[in-house]
Image (cartoon, rainbow, N blue to C red):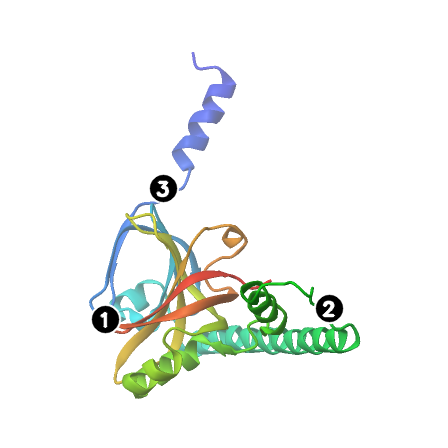
Amino acid sequence: MIPPFSKVFILVVCFAPVVLADDFKTVEGKEYKNVTVSRVEPDGLVLSSKSGISKLYFTELPKEIQERFHYDAAKGNTYSAEQTANLEALYKQRQESERQRVEEREKYWSEHPAQQPQQESSTVSALRGRALDRPAYGQSTTAEFLVSQYATNQINADRLYTGRTFTMSGTIKSIDRSERGEIAVELLVPYRWGGKAWFTRCIFNDSRGLEQYQVGNPIPLIGTVAGLRGYILTIKDCHLHQ
């Protein structure tokens, strides 16, 4: 005879949902193998795997996948527009905070000029001057803007942006760790140029602070533009902008 509590345990096991791994292939041919759909949002699927999490937008997927998950284009567009509006509001808020911080710093140093020691070496003096005068990453941009520049004219964009450090914002498409241990945050670019999907891949030196972010969240960061490879713009030496 099976004890009552054992019957309850058996029932729970029998009716527990079974989450199976699946494979997806975008209309561009990119494959996501052995992934689990952890969340369905109006505009796409949030996937999880051993390497990390990512978001596949329904506009990237074939029609049969859209129908399988009951994609409604109108609801998806509304949801995406809301997310974009939230990102733009956050970006403007951070820009204003940065502007105020720069103004406060300039005012402070104008009222409290730094006194240099008489015997200070030229090297130390140069380093000190750069530390005091360097803008706090005052050059701000978005992943969308940078990609549009490279998509329009890569040669000119290389001249203007490659090797420069920016404060940047964007919406997270994926967070993962490669087989080489590289930590990368891929930012969504909501538009297409030349009929192709473009992305920004931000390489972080460490993952501290990234645990608070999820796919679909806006993220502010600081990084150096490394250039374009295919349809992916790489940003290196990234860290979060607090």
| CA distance for labels 3 and 2 | 69 Å
Q: Secondary structure at mark 1?
A: loop
Which circle, 3 or 2, is nearer the viewer?
Answer: 2
**Relative to residue 224, is residue 66 drawn left or right?**
left
Residue furthest to the front:
119
Q: Examine the image and state in which quarter residue 107 appears.
A: bottom right
Pointer 3 residue: 18
Residue furthest to the top:
1
Q: Residue at x 36, y 76 (%)?
A: 162
Is residue 219 visible to the viewer in this orientation of the structure?
no
Q: Residue at x 32, y 75 (%)?
A: 198
Picture disc at residue 65: none
Q: Where is residue 68 drawn, in percent x and y?
A: 31, 63
Q: Secondary structure at mark 3?
A: loop
Split into 4 quadrants, where in the image is the C terminus? bottom right
Camera-side residue of 47 and 62: 47
Picture disc at residue 115: 2
Pointer 1 residue: 27
Q: Amino acid at mark 1?
A: Val
Split into 4 quadrants, where in the image is the N terminus? top left
Q: Secondary structure at mark 2?
A: loop
Q: Where is residue 114 drawn, in percent x and y?
A: 72, 69
In the image, residue 118 sits, relative to residue 96, either above or below, namely above
Q: Amino acid at mark 3?
A: Val
Q: Marks 1 and 2: CB-CB under 8 Å? A: no
| CA distance for labels 3 and 1 | 28 Å
Is residue 187 visible to the viewer in this orientation of the structure?
yes
**Relative to residue 130, is residue 194 drawn left or right?**
left
Q: Earlier in the sequence, mark 1 or mark 2?
A: 1
Crowdedness near tag 2: few (<14), some (14–19) or many (≥20) residues, C-alpha within 10 Å: few
Q: Earlier in the sequence, mark 3 or mark 2?
A: 3
Which circle, 1 or 2, is nearer the viewer?
Answer: 2
